[in-house]
Image: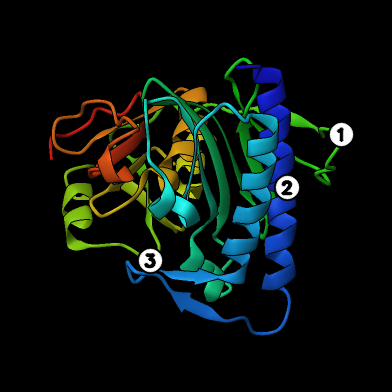
């Protein structure tokens, strides 16, 4: 893989998809349809998916591509692939709460090693550079020219005052019970893969998820967090969360800054 090319293509496609999403978000009321798994889908999901899919297939025709909106037609072979959630946090989008993201990741041997997370309504973009370092870019987000960017890294957490981030739309009792095992100074709610990025920037320390997620929901944020010195492990045995699983479904997991002393579930 040409990682310089990958960085540029993923960044540009995420920005283009963000523009397409925001055109619908800021427009008149849009139709919300229901998929076979009862999750919502909008024209914004479909427009972003078409744009990103076409761009990735053109740039990397020999790399397997998995996207949420086309997952029923995919057959995964091997553990190296591109994986996309064109609009993560559709519920946040529908309710115009702003916590939604464009996610693109590259998985090698079951591990997400490069990724981009773009939150167009928040004007924040996080991605891994060609050498795997996680950065946040600021400015006007020009399609052709990279703006100011700074390397991001997880915080050195205070075990007696941890900052937790949890799902805005999918908070449950199992998650609350797990959080209660720690000494916590602050709990934030956030939607979509922004939760990984808040740990990556040092704004939070711990994100436990005891609920259903899919690989396209997590891969890009996982890559960014890895590049910032964090990690994601399975809830039950604290083994690394890997990708390329049958059905693309994740087990429960914990994302964290590596200084956090994890408690058993």
Real-space CA distance between mark 3 and mark 2, rounded to the nearest whole angstrom: 25 Å
Spatial separation of the CA atoms under disc 3 and disc 1: 35 Å
Q: Quadrant of the N terminus?
A: top right
Q: Quadrant of residue 212?
A: bottom left
The location of residue 213, given as percent across then percent down, is 32, 51
Q: Secondary structure at mark 1?
A: loop
The residue sitting at 37% across, 26% down in the picture is 79
Mark 1 — residue?
145
Frontmost residue, 47 versus 99: 47
Instruction: Name the image quarter holding the C terminus.
Output: top left
**Mark closest to the chain's N terminus, 3 or 2:** 2
Q: Is residue 190 visible?
A: yes
Circle 2 packing at 10 Å, graded few (<14), some (14-19), many (20+), is many
Judged from the image, the secondary structure of the residue bearing numbered disc 2 is helix
- Tag 3, which secondary structure? loop
Q: Which mark is first along the chain, 1 or 3?
A: 1
Residue 92 image offset from top left, x and y in percent: 51, 68
Task: Check if mark 3's residue and mark 2's residue have beta carbons within 8 Å.
Answer: no
Question: How far across and down, in percent of the image, does residue 23 sit?
Answer: 75, 68
Residue at horizontal 37%, vertical 36%? 76
Could you tell me if residue 150 is visible in this image? no
Locate residue 219 relative to residue 143 in the image: left or right. Answer: left
Question: Mark 2 to mark 1: distance in Å?
Answer: 12 Å
Which image quarter: residue 201?
top right
Q: Which residue is mark 2?
A: 15
Marks 2 and 1, the one that precedes in the sequence: 2
| Residue highlighted by disc 3 | 169
């Amino acid at each position: 893989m040409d990682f310089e090319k990958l960085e540029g293509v993923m960044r540009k496609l995420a920005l283009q998809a963000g523009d397409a999403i925001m055109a619908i978000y800021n427009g008149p009321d849009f139709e919300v349809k229901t998929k076979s798994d009862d999750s919502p889908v909008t024209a914004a999901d479909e427009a972003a998916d078409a744009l990103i899919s076409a761009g990735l297939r053109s740039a990397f025709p020999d790399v397997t591509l998995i996207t949420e909106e086309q997952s029923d037609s995919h057959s995964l072979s091997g553990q190296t692939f591109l994986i996309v959630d064109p609009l993560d946090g559709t519920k946040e989008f529908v309710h115009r709460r702003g916590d939604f993201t464009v996610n693109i990741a590259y998985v090698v041997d079951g591990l997400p090693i490069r990724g981009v997370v773009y939150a167009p309504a928040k004007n924040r973009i996080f991605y891994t550079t060609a050498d795997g370092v996680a950065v946040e870019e600021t400015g006007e987000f020009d399609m052709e020219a990279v703006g100011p960017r700074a390397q991001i890294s997880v915080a050195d957490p205070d075990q007696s005052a941890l900052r937790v981030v949890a799902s805005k739309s999918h908070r449950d009792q199992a998650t609350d019970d797990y959080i209660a095992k720690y000494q916590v100074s602050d709990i934030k709610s956030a939607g979509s893969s922004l939760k990984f990025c808040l740990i990556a920037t040092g704004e939070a320390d711990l994100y436990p998820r005891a609920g259903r997620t899919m690989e396209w929901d997590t891969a890009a944020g996982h890559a960014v967090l890895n590049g910032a010195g964090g990690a994601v492990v399975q809830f039950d045995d604290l083994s690394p969360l890997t990708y390329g699983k049958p059905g693309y479904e994740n087990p429960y997991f914990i994302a964290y800054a590596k200084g956090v002393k994890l408690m058993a579930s």
